[in-house]
Image: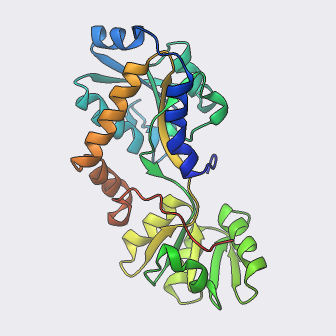
Amino acid sequence: MRAKISAVLVMLIGTIVLIAQPVPQTDEIWDSVQARGTLVFAVDATFPPFSALDGNGNYGGFDVELAHLIAAELQLTPQFKLVSFDSLLGSTVVRQADVAISALVPQPTRTEEVFFSTPYFNAGTRLVTHDKVRYTTVAAWLAGKTLVVELGSQGDVIARRWQKHDATLQVVRVANNAEIHNALQNGIADGGLTDVVAAFEMTIDTASLHTIHVETVPYVLANASQAPTLHAAIEAALQQLEENGELPALRQKWFGTQARALQFDVVEGLP
């Protein structure tokens, strides 16, 4: 995953920025959006399944469909601007785009320039098991178990850290996520650590598998700090889409039933 940040910090960022920054008397960016009737989203279309371009130049992916839902909620027409990942935030500051949406993680060093929305997705590493493990009992569950991970992955990093605290934990390292899935199906391992997309794919293909996250990597939208009204509108749209079920349905469409709920639970007792 591209970055990692505490879920608590994510929730505080918007509040801190709103308090620390003087709020402009007018929001020229929002006025421009309203006058045009369009909302321009900056997208790095190189990160499927969140955003991608097909052979005909059409944008697709989870983030792109979310952009359509947000624009519809605001009674605007979405437009998309192809931007490199490193330039996503800057594109909103220089007004090349109104909003950035592309598997973005909040960056505390950029909060003077941009507003970050509340999270709409948790992309952290996930534990996949045949057991329905509760967040508060993961540490106890690990004792004597065998975990399978992709060599050199973030899951491997986490597994090595866990082994230092529990010598009874065995770790099997494989070449890719497909081998993790096979190890779980064939009973070679009790659980696997993998990225969020692979974890949800495994639970779709195998109904007996369950997954929970063991680290938090929130995805958010961003817009220029000179557009507080636009930021508030995006926040309201996200809240409405969550409450009316459209955003949970979108997560389910792309990642399966277990992805429907947005969860940022604290995993207690893990090293």
- Looking at the picture, tell me which residue is in the foreground, 126 or 27: 27
Q: Can residue 132 be seen in this view?
A: yes
Count numbered badges in the picture: 0
Residue 53's place in the image compared with 121, above or below, is: above
The one nearer the camera, 148 or 241, is 241
Task: Indicate the position of residue 168 as horizontal and vertical percent values.
Answer: 72, 90
Q: Residue at x 39, y 8 (%)?
A: 26
User: Residue at horizontal 22%, vertical 24%?
Assistant: 75
Measured as percent of width and height from the top left, residue 165 is found at 75, 79
Task: Give the x, y percent position of residue 266.
Answer: 53, 63
Quadrant of the rendered image containing residue 70: top left
Residue 70's place in the image compared with 37, above or below, is below
Residue situated in front as seen by the camera: 84 or 234: 234
* Image quadrant where one finds the C terminus: bottom right
Q: Quadrant of residue 140?
A: bottom right
Q: Is residue 61 visible?
A: no
Name the residue at 63% across, 28% down.
Answer: 110
Q: In the picture provided, is 199 more to the left or to the right than 204?
A: right
The residue positioned farthest toward the right in the image shown: 164
Instruction: Name the residue rendered at 69%, 73% in the picture.
Output: 159
Extreme-front residue of the structure: 19
Q: Residue 30's quadrant in the figure? A: top left
Answer above or below: position of 201 versus 251.
below
- The percent position of residue 233, horizontal first and vertical second, equals 33, 27
